[in-house]
């Protein structure tokens, strides 16, 4: 079955940039999406269709794609950005089932 | 405002059954495809099931196929998930989520707060 691979953890200091990667063989064919989940809360969409930012999401959140790797970049990280981040995409064959990456814990030191 | 409110979770013994409900408001429920996503305690997100707007198409994760059934009632603005033959590994928070886009390139834009299902003897 299709898998999306993320690093388990990323740590940065406030004001630095954080980059979280997501690797998947079918990302050249299917969009990547990113969700932020703070402790005890439901996930929130922060990037859709590889690079687009929903209304209400700060401009410091951006997405990029290069081949089989999608990247979520958070510029000028704030303390409130500490959360788990999940990438999400679709299988390009069969029933086009949905897949989440394993999640990355962003720690703001 | 879009609201999705889940209910029906609880403690259930292995092999038992449970029916989850999701009450939707603030949007035209009958126009949207819907899904369930779950999250085991301390673990990541797992897509569980999908249903089309008219209920003519459903999909399931391999882990729940044959045991879970998704359904909806557009007249009641409600989504359901019937959970049968429950196992300890089904223990999770179950989220009702609204889908954007067609199934072939879909994503989830609104999530409920979830309902906890605990499978234990």
Image (tube, coloured by chain):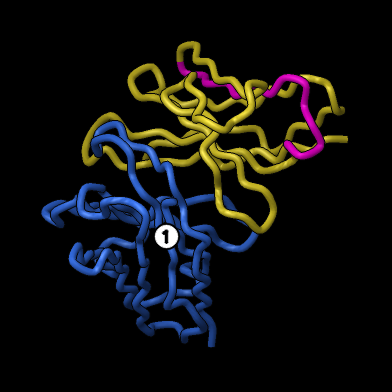
Chain colours: A yellow, B blue
Q: Is residue B46 something that shows in the picture?
A: yes
Q: Is residue A5 something that shows in the picture?
A: no
Q: Residue at x 32, y 51 (%)?
A: B27
Picture quadrant where residue A99 is located? top left
Horizontal side of A41 relative to B93 (left or right) equals right
Horizontal side of A99 relative to B102 (left or right) equals right
Residue closer to the observer: B29 or B80: B29
Picture quadrant where residue A89 is located? top left
Q: Residue at x 55, y 61 (%)?
A: B40
Picture quadrant where residue A106 is located? top right
Residue A105 horizontal/vertical position (percent): 70, 41
Q: Which residues are magenta?
A: A68-81
Q: Quadrant of the N terminus of chain A?
A: top left
Residue assigned mark 1: B4
Q: Quadrant of the C terminus of chain A?
A: top right
Q: Residue at x 40, y 76 (%)?
A: B86
Residue B50 horizontal/vertical position (percent): 28, 52
Q: Chain of mark 1?
A: B
Residue closer to the observer: B33 or B26: B26
Q: Is residue A36 magenta?
A: no
Whether B58 is drawn above or below A88: the answer is below
């Amino acid at each position: 079955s299709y898998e999306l691979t993320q690093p388990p953890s990323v740590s940065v200091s406030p004001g630095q940039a954080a980059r979280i990667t997501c690797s998947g063989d079918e990302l050249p064919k299917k969009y990547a999406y990113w969700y932020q989940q703070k402790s005890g809360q439901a996930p929130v969409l922060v990037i859709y269709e590889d690079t687009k930012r929903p209304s209400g999401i700060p401009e410091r959140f951006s997405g990029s794609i290069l081949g089989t790797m999608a990247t979520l970049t958070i510029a000028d990280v704030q303390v409130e950005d500490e959360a788990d981040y999940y990438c999400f995409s679709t299988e390009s064959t069969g029933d086009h089932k949905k897949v989440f990456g394993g999640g990355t814990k962003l720690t703001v030191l | 405002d879009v609201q999705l409110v889940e209910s029906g979770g609880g403690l259930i013994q292995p092999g038992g059954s449970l029916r989850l409900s999701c009450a939707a408001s603030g949007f035209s429920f009958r126009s949207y495809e819907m899904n369930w996503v779950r999250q085991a305690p301390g673990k990541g997100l797992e897509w569980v099931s999908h249903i089309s707007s008219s209920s003519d198409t459903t999909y399931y994760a391999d882990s729940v196929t044959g045991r879970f059934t998704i359904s909806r009632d557009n007249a009641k603005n409600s989504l359901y998930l019937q959970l049968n033959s429950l196992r300890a590994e089904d223990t999770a928070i179950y989220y009702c989520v609204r889908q954007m886009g067609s199934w072939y390139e879909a994503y989830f834009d609104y999530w409920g707060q979830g309902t906890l299902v605990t499978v234990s003897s």
